Image: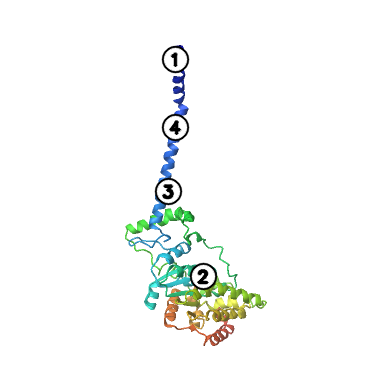
Amino acid sequence: MDNSKEKKNITENKNTENNTPETTDAKRWKRFFASTFSMIAILLLGAAGLVIWIDPFFHYHAPFDGVSYVLEDERYQNDGIARHFDYELLIIGTSMCENFRTSQAEELFGMKAVKTPFAGGYFKEISDAEGRALSYNPDIKIVIRSLDQGFAWLDKDKENEIVADAKFLYDDNYFNDLPYIFNHKVLFYYLPETIKRSIDKVPADNFDDYARFAEDRPLGKDVLLARMYHPADPEWQPPYTEEDVELLKENINQNFMKNPADYPDVQFYYFFPPYSVASWYENYYAPCKFNKYMMTFRTMTDMLLEYDNVHIFSFFDETDITGNLDNYSDVAHYSGEVNDQMLIWMAEGSHEITKENKDEYWDMIDEIYRNYDYESMYE
C-alpha cells in the first residue's frame, strides 16, 4: 500500500515538473518559431510564384496581354526577349544600336522586330547573345548588328568586366534562378510597378523606347568638345605586328563568322557605326593608329564577305553626318535621327560594301580621314 502511494507521488511530481514555467515557455517558443518559419516560407513561396507568374525578365514565358511590363535592364531582359517574343528581325549590338526604332524597322523591312542591345558589350558577349537568339527562334530572317571596330583588337573571349553579369538567366537550369526570383529590385520595383501600371491601364514599354537615350543626352559641338580628349600632336606608335593581325582574325572568326555559317538562310546586316571626325582624330589619327585601323576595316570586310548572307554597311563617307559635330553627344554616340537614316539606307541596300567595291571604298575613306582638316573642329 505504501509502495502505491510512493509511485503515485513520484508520478505527480513528474507531471508537476513537466508543467514548470520554463517548460511552458519552451513550448511557446517552439510554436512561435514554427509559425514564424511557416509564415516566412509561405511569403517566400508566394513571392517566388508571383515572380514566375508575372516574369518581368521573360525568363519563363512570353509576356501576358494586358500586363504593363517595364523594359529597362538590357542584360537581364534581353535573353528572355530573344527567347520568348515573336519576331523575324533582330536588332542587336552595342549602344550604337540603342536608338533604333523597331517600329521603323518593321515598316521598312515588312516584318516583326525586337531590339536587344548590350551597351558596352564586347564581341563575344554580343556574338553569344546573337547565337542564342538564332537557336531560340527559327523564324528569324534578318539580324542587324553593329561592327564596333574599337573592340576588334581584344582577345576573342574578352568580356566587359564592369557590366552586369546575368548569365544565370541565359540557360535552362532553373536551379540557379534564385538570384532572379528573390532579387530585391525584382520584388520591390519590377513587380509592384508592373502591377500598378497594369491596374492603371498604362501601356507596356515598347522597343522604340527600350534603352533609347536620344532624347536624354544633350547634343552639339560644344557638348562633344567638352567631353573629348584633346591630343596635342600625333604621337608615334609602333606598327601592328603579325601577332596583332592573328588576334584580330581570331576575334572576327569566332565572334562574327560562326553565326552566318551556322544559319545560311538568315541575312546578317552588319554595319560600321558612323563615329564622328572627332573620334577619328582622338582614337586613330592623333595616336598614330590610322594605318592599324584602316587595316582592321579591310580585314573585317574581307573575312565577312566570304559569306553570301552577310551584308556590310558603312556610312563613313557621309561626312555631312560625321563632320557635323552637332549630331553627337560625344565622339561616338550620334542622334536618333542618324539611327533612323541608317535603317533607311540598309533597307534600300545603300552604302553596302561588296566584294566588287570594297577596295575602292576603303581607299576613299583612307583619303577622306587621313587628310581631313581636324583643326576645323575647333572653329
Q: Give the SS element for disc 3.
A: helix
Q: Residues within 10 Å of mark 4 (few under 14, many from 20)?
A: few
How much space separates mark 2 and mark 1, taking CA atoms? 88 Å
How much space separates mark 2 and mark 3, taking CA atoms? 36 Å
Q: Residue 340: x and y, percent?
A: 42, 76
Q: Give the SS element for disc 4.
A: helix
How much space separates mark 3 and mark 4, taking CA atoms? 26 Å
Query: Sequence-wise, which precedes: disc 2 or disc 1?
Result: 1
Circles 2 and 3, Cβ within 8 Å, touching? The answer is: no
The image quadrant where one finds the N terminus is top left
Residue 192, above or below 89: above
Three-letter amino acid code at the position of disc 3: Leu
Q: Residues within 10 Å of mark 1 (few under 14, many from 20)?
A: few
How much space separates mark 2 and mark 4, taking CA atoms? 60 Å
Q: Nearer the viewer, mark 1 or mark 4?
A: 1
Residue 16, above or below 103: above
Q: Residue 323: x and y, percent?
A: 51, 80
Three-letter amino acid code at the position of disc 1: Ser
Residue, disc 1 = 4
Residue, disc 2 = 127
Q: Between residues 131 and 110, which one lies in front from this camera angle?
A: 131
Q: Nearer the viewer, mark 1 or mark 3?
A: 1
Number of the label disc, if any, that sits on residue 44: 3
Q: Give the SS element for disc 2.
A: helix
Residue shown at 43%/78% (left/top)?
343
Circles 2 and 4, Cβ within 8 Å, touching? The answer is: no
Task: Tell me if residue 334 can be seen.
Answer: no
Residue, disc 4 = 27
Three-letter amino acid code at the position of disc 2: Ser
Name the residue at the top extreme.
1
